[in-house]
Amino acid sequence: MRIIFIYTTKICKPNTKSFTPTSLIPSILRATPTNTFTPTRPMSQSVAIPKKLQRVRDHGYDDYMEVEKKMRKVLKFQDLILSQPTSVISISRLDTVARRLGLSLKQFEAGRFVLKFPHVFEIFEHPVQRILYCRLTRKAQLQIDGVNEALIAQIPDAVTRLRKLLMLSNTGRLQLEHVRIARKDFGLPDDFEFSVILKYPQFFRLFDAKECRSKYVEIVERDPKLTVCAIERLREREYREKGIDAEDIRFSFIVRFPPGFKIGKYYKIAVWKWQRVPYWSPYDDISGYDLRSLEAQKRMEKRAVAMIHELLSLTVEKKITLERIAHFRLVMNLPKKLKDFLLQHQGIFYISTRGNHGKLHTVFLREAYKKGELIEPNDLYLARRKLAELILLSPKKAYVDRELVRYRRGGEDNEMRNFNRDYAENSFSDFETEANGRHDGEGEDKLQSDLDCDSEPDYTDEDTDSEEGGDVGATRVLGN
């Protein structure tokens, strides 16, 4: 009460200055604990795509990579068996060589592994040495032959893919070793240096770098017809089939978020804005542009997305490991932190860590797959997936097939035995019938000759010159 009285007396004290109501406002504002007169402005969230996003798993791609992990190990064992002179190897030696090459870590693990896939590997006992050997089944051999035929048949397409890959580079050249590491992803044969590069000198040039000992492959001439990206053809098809506004899809990508991905309102706005940001084509030369402005940085970021999209479109299975993309990072102007960069665009790409205990990162192009299968498969992809079908087949079916084969072989052997027995019996009965008939005929002839001899006992010398006379004469001589 005392403090309030002093405060009121100070206010009511007459002042020599002119009194105005507005002169009380500063003192009241200083006396009040909170400033209730200042208008508050709500915090606005950013409409840019976050730099770090949590990865959301898509089990369709992860299951695909689980089968791919088994396929890679099976292919290594296949190469090991085919490297033998007779394409046959004993189980004991297989276990030793597999541990030496790092395919298995424990003893007898190689034997257990080949027993899991009876449709691919066949274990048999040597007829003389009486030890177990391993070889490829007929189905696996046919699958390998199919892959080789498909690989040879698509070499012209592989030449086009290699040309476009070189055109994506800033300098039009790539290290030969980097191309060799990723040769299976782009559908190139193992001897592509001779069967592709040196065979087509009008497209490629092979040379040694002066500053290092590495070999480089360079494109001879850029073809303007090959500078059309896969996403541009897809935009044109979407425009013609669905009639979407050309301005909306001019610089946009197909976005399909994984199930369970949380999409907020501001994230939708950020993606909508990003889809309309223009960018330079991956095949364009950007050496003459000023890249220091903020707008140029945005264009370069979207160009990196288009570059990886085009790189994945050139592969056979529309997927490639992140480590192999890193080999082309400098020559294709890709960002340093590739994994974080790709996680910003989970609607376009998917990164799977399955396949090698989390050490291997495989990047998929989401628009090319549906439910874990390629939407537009090619012959080489189908030939490779037949090995996956053999791996996924149940071992029980292999045992049933072998029993059926044995049953059929046993049935055929029994039929052959019965047929041979029946044939022998029929032949013997026919022979007996024919022999009996022959003996009966001879007896009748003999009886008839005896009757003739009794009826005509006298013969002259002239009758002996004829055939009948000769026969009768001989009979008479024998009779005497």
Image (cartoon, grey):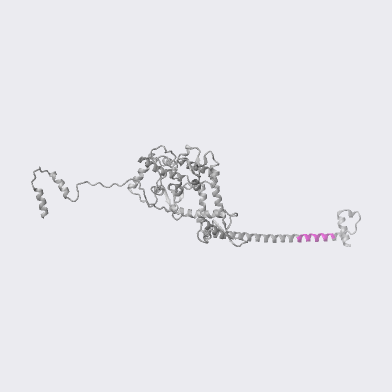
Is 403 on the left or on the right of 9, as rendered? right
Q: In the rendered image, is residue 370 in sight? A: no
Residue 22, given in percent of the width and then of the height, sits at 14, 44
Is 419 on the left or on the right of 168, as rendered? right
Residue 166, given in percent of the width and then of the height, sits at 48, 41
The stretch of residues the image draws in magenta is 435-449
Front residue (pair 85, 44)? 85
Residue 112, given in percent of the width and then of the height, sits at 52, 60
Q: Is residue 242 above or below residue 78?
A: above
Q: Residue shown at 27%/47% (left/top)?
A: 43
Q: Is residue 439 magenta?
A: yes
Residue 190, given in percent of the width and then of the height, sits at 54, 47
Position of the N terminus by quadrant: bottom left
Q: Main secondary structure of the magenta part?
A: helix
Is 384 on the left or on the right of 347, as rendered? right
Q: Is residue 108 above or below residue 284?
A: below
User: Which residue appears farthest toward the right when viewing the image?
Assistant: 461
Position of the C terminus by quadrant: bottom right
Front residue (pair 451, 365)? 365
Front residue (pair 55, 287)? 287
Q: Is residue 444 magenta?
A: yes
Is 175 on the left or on the right of 263, as rendered? right
